[in-house]
Image: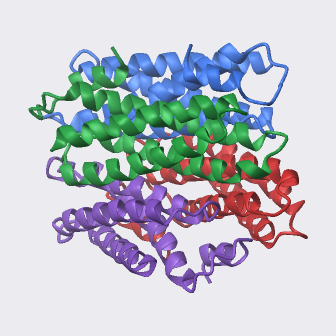
Chain colours: A red, B blue, C purple, D green
Amino acid sequence: MSTAKTMLDTHPADTGESDLDILARCIDACRTCAQTCTACADACLDEPDVTPLRTCISTNLNCADLCTTTADVLSRRTGLDTELLRAVLRACDYACTVCADECAAHAEHHNHCRVCAQACRTCAQACRELLTSLG
Amino acid sequence: MSTAKTMLDTHPADTGESDLDILARCIDACRTCAQTCTACADACLDEPDVTPLRTCISTNLNCADLCTTTADVLSRRTGLDTELLRAVLRACDYACTVCADECAAHAEHHNHCRVCAQACRTCAQACRELLTSLG
Amino acid sequence: MSTAKTMLDTHPADTGESDLDILARCIDACRTCAQTCTACADACLDEPDVTPLRTCISTNLNCADLCTTTADVLSRRTGLDTELLRAVLRACDYACTVCADECAAHAEHHNHCRVCAQACRTCAQACRELLTSLG
Amino acid sequence: MSTAKTMLDTHPADTGESDLDILARCIDACRTCAQTCTACADACLDEPDVTPLRTCISTNLNCADLCTTTADVLSRRTGLDTELLRAVLRACDYACTVCADECAAHAEHHNHCRVCAQACRTCAQACRELLTSLG
């Protein structure tokens, strides 16, 4: 079991959700995506031909910031505000989708972009599943 | 002149914007709000009667995270994606408005909440002005 | 294999390290600890008797910030500066050790503190192993 | 008066410090430096000849992370731990000094690096003053 799920299960709030698995999966996907995008930005920066990777680096940095913030906001159950979750998840889904597309365009040449594109797709999908479950 | 404005003026991108002042003001408001919310969360936590301030603390922490991320995303002009800015600004505007309302409810008793409510209102307003200027 | 390790393996830098496993383990431990501390701070905040948990909340928030920053700094291999890594790892080791002790003091009553104390111990240990391997 | 100073003055803790001005100045310098380094990293990335600026970008990103975390840790007065402050300030002072030197090497060609070098020097100085005042 992921640590995120364990922490949700030991939280005093009984938020009546049947969907803690979906929530935990989204937190885990955001955290993994944040780390992967931070690493991919740096790997792109260190490539011999960095010029065509500028947008990829910037996109990675934005996606990493959004994913870290989304994971943290999702982890807070006190004073829960579903409308805030929706707005943050929409922004995170968008950032991950853009970053997945950008990284996919470099995936043939750079393995870090291939791995990162997959982490971004997984995270965008997890955000959309949670959005659906929130109604 | 704020450092944010100076950095926008020295950036190599000529993004053709007539609205760098609005952008710089939003970055500055986000940074100030993030710091104020981080400090207000801790001041609330240290109040003798912390129980009625739980939601305020959680709301402050969410608002601080959103404002820091928004300031950072707005500071990146490489590979600019206006739709990403809109999604992030909408989430930040919402988080600031909720936090302003929550802090305002405690402003009579706690000066840190009074100051923080004002920083949140200023930031929400700056986000909406930038959203309007983005079209 | 962890995503952190995959990203290190696909990075263009050949930093000549024999210790990428130790590095990846530290990045993973920092990310897990950051998420766990963010969740534990919020779980503490939501406990019926929050007053004795104030220091624990503040300690959790500091530890989460340090762990996120440490994971990000460790993920950047471009322009590697070992002295910076040492200073950051020392601060992170300290923050994790303090947070582990504080959470352990509440572990009997709160399962989230018990889980969090373990994540903090694991992370402090990973920071020290990496410090040793850096020489 | 800076918002950081106002928030320290309205905090319920009476930490008996005569040095809230030094503390507020350090928080403000960290926040300004974080924003400036985030913007400088992006401006460097967008320069026509990005290759010689790789290390500068990576150094800027590390410095931004350290400064944001330092500002947040310094803003928390609940459960104050002076040894943690010292470890974080030492890491931040180091990151700022390295970034100031790196940016200064490009200051003649890039105004964003010239402005950023100054923000980093100011922040490093503020960290050292606070370290001295902590004893």
Q: Is residue D121 left or right of residue B4?
A: left
Residue furthest to the left in view is D16
Q: Is residue C62 left or right of residue B93?
A: left
User: In terms of image quadrants, where is residue A87?
Assistant: top right
Q: Position of residue A119 (x, y in %)?
A: 71, 66
Count of numbered tags: 0
Task: Work out whether residue A128 or residue C25 is closer to the camera in this orientation and state it.
Answer: C25
Q: Position of residue A117 (x, y in %)?
A: 78, 63
Q: Quadrant of the N terminus of chain D?
A: top left
| Above/below status of C112 relative to C19 | above
Q: Position of residue C82 (x, y in %)?
A: 49, 66
Q: Position of residue A111 (x, y in %)?
A: 80, 73
Question: Taking the image as drawn, is residue D61 in sight?
Answer: yes
| Above/below status of B68 relative to A89 | above
Q: Is residue B38 left or right of residue A35?
A: left
| Above/below status of B58 relative to A115 | above
User: In terms of image quadrants, where is residue C100?
Assistant: bottom left
Q: Is residue C109 left or right of residue C93?
A: left
